[in-house]
Image (cartoon, helix red, strand yellow):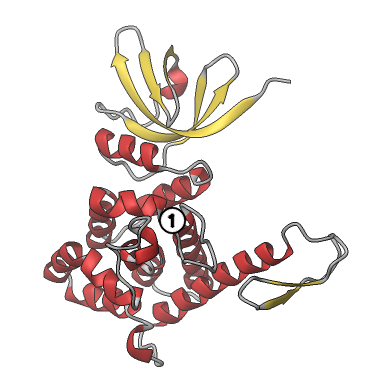
Amino acid sequence: METFDVDIAWISLLDRANDIWSVETRDKRFYQESCNLRGLQHTDGYIALIEIHSNQLARVLDTEMLQLPQDVVRTHFAWRQPDQLDAQGALWYYAETIENTVLKEFITNILSDAKIMHPFYIARASQDYHHNEKGGLFKHSVQVALTAIHLACNHELEEDEVECAFVCGLLHDIGKIMMFYNTDKNQQKGVNGQHEAFSFMVLAEHLERLKAQDKTLFEAVSATLSANVNGKKHCEYVIETIVRAADLVSAEAYQSRAAFKGKPASLLRASFHSGKHYKRLKQM
């Protein structure tokens, strides 16, 4: 049986007369002559989900992904951690579905900002709790974004609210890239405090542009990103509640898996290293 891998690639047409294409993934680059790569026919290339077969031939599976400049795509490929392929693909896929032009420009500009995205790909989501491995913040953030968009859809929110829930879910912990446990080994350059407040420092330039373009959208995004600042209890926007819930699900699911990792299959109750106890329904 033929084997193949699934990956994300930057595909560009090199020679139109001979139908020669360049296929560039995170780890390899090759060339082929094939109509299977025509996809969107962008003159400067495009991002696609592909199958790479054992004979080094690629077939496009999906081109419905956010189209970013080639240099940005290459840096994202370089920053992506080994276990972030699915998260990266999901992020680009759902970002492409955003129809609100202001919100799409907002998230596209952030994804193109190396000062934000490089640390975002490699940062931990916490020092000792959930997703505390290298690259954990990115995976956790995409999980929250995906859960948020599904919750918003299931509860029949308006389209702008659904899209805003996705974007805010992705960015809800972005301030953590400034935290002391994500800056350097000696923990001298980072800060310690409420990461929600730091999110506004990280996103200052982009939020300022958003405010100038759409104040209503700016207010919703700002409210959701500051949901836990100063003990805020009442959420005026439903998307605040949705992002909070999605955040909790991602964190609890991670800690539950970690609690049972390496434990006997017969064990039905285990503790996470924080002292929190978890149960499961049946023996594995």
Q: Is residue 8 above or below residue 65?
A: above
43 to the left or right of 122: left
Residue at figure coordinates x 11%, y 69% from the top left: 212
Q: Picture quarter containing residue 16? A: top left
Q: Could you say where residue 203 lies in the image, as x and y percent from the top left?
A: 23, 64
What is the residue that sits farthest to the top in this orientation? 18
What is the residue that sits farthest to the front in this orientation? 186
Report whether residue 31 is seen: yes
Q: Is residue 39 above or below residue 265?
A: above
- The quadrant of the image that shows the N terminus is top right
Q: Could you say where residue 138 lies in the image, as x and y percent from the top left?
A: 43, 56
Residue at figure coordinates x 35%, y 62% from the top left: 187
- Dot 1 surroundings within 10 Å: few (below 14), some, or many (20 or more)? many
What is the residue that sits farthest to the left in this orientation? 212
Report whether residue 167 is seen: no
Amino acid type of the residue that numbered disc 1 sits on in the rendered structure: Phe
Residue at figure coordinates x 39%, y 50% from the top left: 121
Q: Could you say where residue 166 lies in the image, as x and y percent from the top left?
A: 40, 64
Q: Picture quarter containing residue 141? A: bottom left
Residue highlighted by disc 1? 138
- The quadrant of the image that shows the C terminus is bottom right
